[in-house]
Image (spheres, helix red, strand yellow):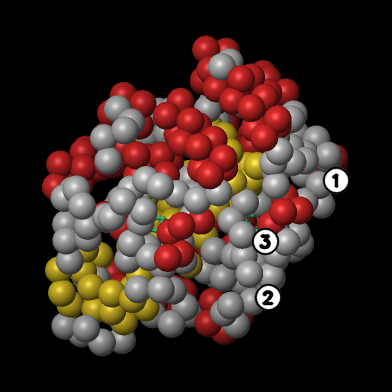
């Protein structure tokens, strides 16, 4: 039996090899190349059998780099009248992928960059010329009015220079929104290698959150930043996550996932029918639904907080990936139907 639900995001988890080797990233492939090539087939099927009752954004992401996929154009075509959101490290965009993405009528980018200097990107092992090239690409894309978000993993190597990064963005890329988020500890890693000291965290609180008047234009809502600081301080989440109420995930095995961010719960498999409508039936619990939720904090948090009433409609309308009246209206409906656990 498979699940059918209303969602803002259809998150197709495309896991592949990568051209970079960021040290905090999950190592080893989860899906083989052939399975990734099936992405088109599985999303097509999901759409055909109506697994997704309604959704606004087709998001391609995963632990890998989608710009390496030969069939990126075909995948983009599947997004049809939906917004296409591509998560990428940005380094290979000029080699043909950007053209394919921009051929879509409503594209948006989410680029991972831990700062504007080599030192800030030391865990991503990016050279200054690679960083400068990514910034140049983003400037061109920004000039076309395409929504851009930047994901920055916060570590001891970049937290200190974050205010300088914000100043850089204000002058070079003033229409982006940068989401700092903490390192998720994977079993293979020594998470303490990436840890942030209490002094560094308190300086971040003082300079970045305290400097919100100055930097707010390129930052997510203040409440998101405060929650992130709280999360890093305690090392785990103690607040509701509403992500399963607005995301549907599909993995390489055709499983439909309540949440694509590591939940073990499968709502069904697209190889099996009939479908069950689960829209509006996913409740939250105080510390998240699964044990995997304990150390999970990512860029979906900002939307999760809106659904949970912690961020206002005005604040959420600034977030580039969802900044479109129809998407915001759908999100308002989901928020209205959300059942607080
Ligand atoms: C896994 S990547 C995949 C997409 C693409 N290759 C990229 O780098 O944007 C998705 C996001 O997860 C981040 N990431 C990787 N390992 C992480 C970890 N251990 N904790 C938190 N975020 C991580 C990356 O920096 C990136 O922003
Ligand atoms: S974070 Fe992205 S760019 Fe870095 S190794 Fe992982 S998949 Fe590749
Ligand atoms: S805390 Fe993370 S894994 Fe848990 S439901 Fe939220 S986004 Fe998914």
The answer to whether 6 appears left or right of 296 in the picture is left
Label 2 belongs to which residue? 28
Q: CA distance from mark 2 to mark 1?
A: 23 Å
Q: Which mark is residue 168?
A: none
Along the viewing direction, whichever of 288 and 119 lies nearer the viewer? 288
Along the viewing direction, whichever of 327 and 69 lies nearer the viewer? 327
Tell me what residue is drawn at x 70 percent, y 47 percent: 195
Mark before the other along the chain sequence, 2 or 1:
2
Mark before the other along the chain sequence, 1 or 3:
3
Q: CA distance from mark 1 to mark 3?
A: 18 Å
The answer to whether 180 appears left or right of 317 in the picture is right
Along the viewing direction, whichever of 271 and 146 lies nearer the viewer? 271
Q: Which mark is residue 127?
A: 1
Circle 2: element type: loop
Tell me what residue is drawn at x 52 percent, y 60 percent: 61
Does the residue tagged 3 have its C-beta within 8 Å of any atom of ligand 2? yes
- Mark 1 nearby-residue class (10 Å; few <14, some 14–19, many ≥20): some
Label 3 belongs to which residue? 25
Q: Quadrant of ligand 1?
A: bottom right
């Amino acid at each position: 039996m498979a699940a059918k639900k209303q969602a803002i995001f259809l998150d197709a988890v495309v896991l592949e090899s990568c051209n970079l080797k960021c040290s905090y990233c999950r190592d080893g492939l989860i899906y083989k190349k052939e399975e990734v090539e099936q992405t088109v087939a599985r999303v097509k099927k999901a759409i055909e059998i109506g697994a997704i009752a309604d959704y606004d954004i087709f998001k391609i992401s995963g632990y890998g780099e989608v710009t390496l996929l030969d069939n990126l154009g075909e995948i983009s075509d599947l997004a049809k009248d939906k917004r296409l959101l591509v998560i990428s490290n940005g380094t290979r965009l000029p080699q043909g992928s950007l053209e394919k993405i921009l051929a879509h009528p409503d594209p948006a980018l989410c680029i991972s960059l831990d700062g504007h200097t080599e030192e800030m990107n030391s865990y991503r092992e990016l050279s200054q010329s690679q960083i400068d090239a990514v910034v140049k690409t983003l400037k061109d894309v920004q000039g076309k009015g395409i929504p851009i978000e930047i994901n920055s993993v916060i570590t001891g190597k970049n937290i200190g220079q974050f205010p300088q990064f914000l100043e850089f963005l204000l002058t070079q890329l003033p229409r982006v929104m940068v989401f700092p988020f903490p390192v998720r500890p994977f079993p293979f890693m020594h998470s303490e290698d990436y840890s942030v000291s209490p002094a560094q965290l308190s300086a971040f609180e003082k300079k970045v959150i305290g400097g919100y008047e100055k930097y707010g234009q390129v930052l997510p809502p203040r409440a998101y930043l405060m929650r992130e600081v709280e999360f890093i301080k305690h090392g785990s989440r103690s607040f509701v996550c509403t992500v399963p109420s607005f995301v549907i995930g599909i993995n390489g095995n055709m499983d439909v996932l309540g949440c694509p961010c590591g939940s073990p719960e499968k709502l069904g498999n697209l190889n099996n029918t009939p479908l069950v409508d689960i829209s509006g039936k996913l409740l939250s619990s105080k510390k998240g639904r699964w044990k995997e939720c304990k150390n999970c904090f990512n860029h979906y948090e900002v939307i999760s907080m809106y659904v949970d009433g912690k961020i206002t409609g005005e604040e959420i309308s600034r977030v580039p990936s969802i900044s479109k009246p129809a998407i915001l209206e759908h999100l308002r409906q989901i928020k209205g139907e959300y059942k607080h656990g």
